[in-house]
Image (cartoon, rainbow, N blue to C red):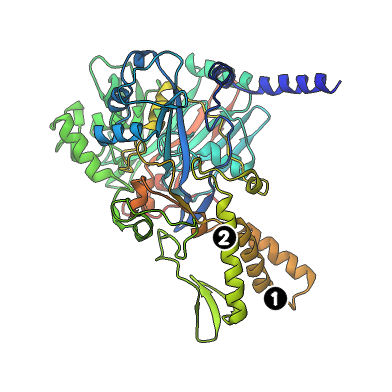
Amino acid sequence: MSSAVDAKLSEENEEKLTKRARKRKRGQDMFVKKHNHTPEGFDHKPETSYYFEDGLRKVYPYSFIFKTFVKGRWMGRKLVDIYQAEYLSTSLEEHISNIEKGLVTVNGKKVSPDFKLANNQLIENKLHRHEGAVLDLPIEIVADTPEVLVVNKPPSIPCHPCGRYRYNSLTHILEHEHGYTNLRILYRLDRLTSGLLIMPKTTKTSVKMESQLERKLCHKEYVCRVVGRFPDGEVECTEPLEILSRRLSMQGVIPNGKESKTTFTRLSCNGTSSVVKCIPHTGRTHQIRVHLQYLGYPILNDPLYNNTAFGPSKGKGGVMENSLEEMEKITMETSNIGAWKKGDNPYYISRFGEDGLKPAPSNLLPAEGPLSSSSSLVKEPSENQNGACKVGNIETSQKCNSTASEEASNEMKMKEDVADSFDDINFERSPKLNENRTEKCSTDEDKTDECCRDQTEPNLEQGMSIVDNVAETDCVTLESESKKLKRDQSISADTIGEEADTNKQLCEKVKVSKEKPTFDPRKLTVDRNCKACRHVYHDPTPDQLIIYLHAVKYTGPDWEYSTSLPYWAKEDFVDTDTQIRWPN
């Protein structure tokens, strides 16, 4: 009886998966059965967590494995040639080095760079992943029904995992903070674009709405703010579009490109810039942005298409006055958000040396803490004038006497015990530590060929390679679950006070639990071969994480959803105002 119930539940869960997810699951099961090898990452576990700093949502670096099956165009070609041609790393030497170190494997086995790929082989690429920061803005729920979830997507957040974003993607944030799982993406908005996003909850609804979009039964409206005074009346642009630079994910007007059509109407003008309503009749990548560039009215703060990299005319009329190589170089120099170094990471140097060849420390929890993006190295406990111990910026009432020294010795032993529970190769927490973790992150990613390629490519706006970053050993971690629990209890006790009544204690505990987590150096990991770990980088500023383009309304045969206009779409908006405002 129990087995019959389990089988029925399994069938119901299977029906809830998308067709692509079911196909991926069958492929994984067949691979495991044929090769007797379960790839790391097929059993998904939460690898990291969020913290908030300076108005940004950030993710602690974590170990990750990109997985992809050999594509038809790869068969018979050398592994190193595939990485050199398709994954845009910084150099051929680094590709070779990663393969020789075993960071890139085929069917779970170490191979040579000249290994020739065959059908149905699985390529796994191990790395130490550093995700880009996004704005700490709330996600407004526009509608929530059994069939769909409709949200007002904030700028800077990608719709789904891609490039250098996974936990900092909309689908993962919605699961982590709101509990939504297995959402479908009906259409995508650019990472910097804000506005209406419709996500079906069931396969039936997804198929229905996708069919309506394909048959052009849906009406779409966007608003943007462009340079100058946009012409009166209705302006139509029908220039064909095609990819211009795969390296920059940049589109352009190409004579033999794909059919595209957009209608524009000016809504207001403040004297130097105009708010324009945009109605795209087709759904090409960057269609609105490229058509506005072609018309000579690019979006005011567009980092790609309002750029002198195209030449003095900025691409008006489809004219490129610079070569593609010059254009790529200038764009990378001016738009490398997050790639500007603040300096070397002293924490990395203290562990592995400037060249990364220094032997790793014997214990994984060294005395000094790592470098936060907004603070100096966390200092050793020291005694202040009042005799209280101070760790970083946290003061406790405990005296630094012989008893404290004895407790510190016991605490160091506890640190070493916790360190032993970490798996040095896979950087995964032991099952013992995983039992107490409550964080969950979605891993049911819709990985199209393009998306899988983008996940292994570096995001050039961040200016870092992610193909060649991780080593199998020598990853230093600073998280101690036991100590964290002890510290939290101590902070709660100090905050609430021993003389407070029971109700006040409860209120204060709830208040503390709802506070957004800030940077905790004990959760930071540093990897020997990770290029991003070697330096400290400037955070992007809010105005670098938004573009003045917003999806306002989507209308179908029997449904309609809309949002209010963004703050920059008001007629009296001042172009120099860079303060980001968002509905609470």
The residue tagged 2 is: 415
Q: Nearer the viewer, residue 307 or 135?
A: 135
Q: Residue at 20%, 26% (x, y): give it.
A: 318
**Going 60% across and 39% down the picture, which residue do you hit?**
175
Q: Position of residue 406 (x, y in %)?
A: 60, 75
Q: Nearer the viewer, residue 271 or 5?
A: 5
In the image, residue 364 sits, relative to residue 332, either above or below, namely below
Tell me the quadrant of the picture where the N terminus can be found: top right
Q: Please tell me in which quadrant of the rendered image residue 314 appears.
A: top left
Q: Are marks 1 and 2 in contact (CB under 8 Å)?
A: no
Q: Earlier in the sequence, mark 1 or mark 2?
A: 2
Q: In the rendering, at what x and y percent does residue 477 appear?
A: 49, 53
Distance in Å between CA atoms under marks 1 and 2: 28 Å
Residue 299 x/y as whole percent: 31, 39
Q: Is residue 297 visible?
A: no
Q: Secondary structure at mark 1?
A: loop
Mark 1 lies on residue:
497
- Quarter of the image for residue 353 reads bottom left
Q: How many marks?
A: 2
Q: Nearer the viewer, residue 515 or 380?
A: 380
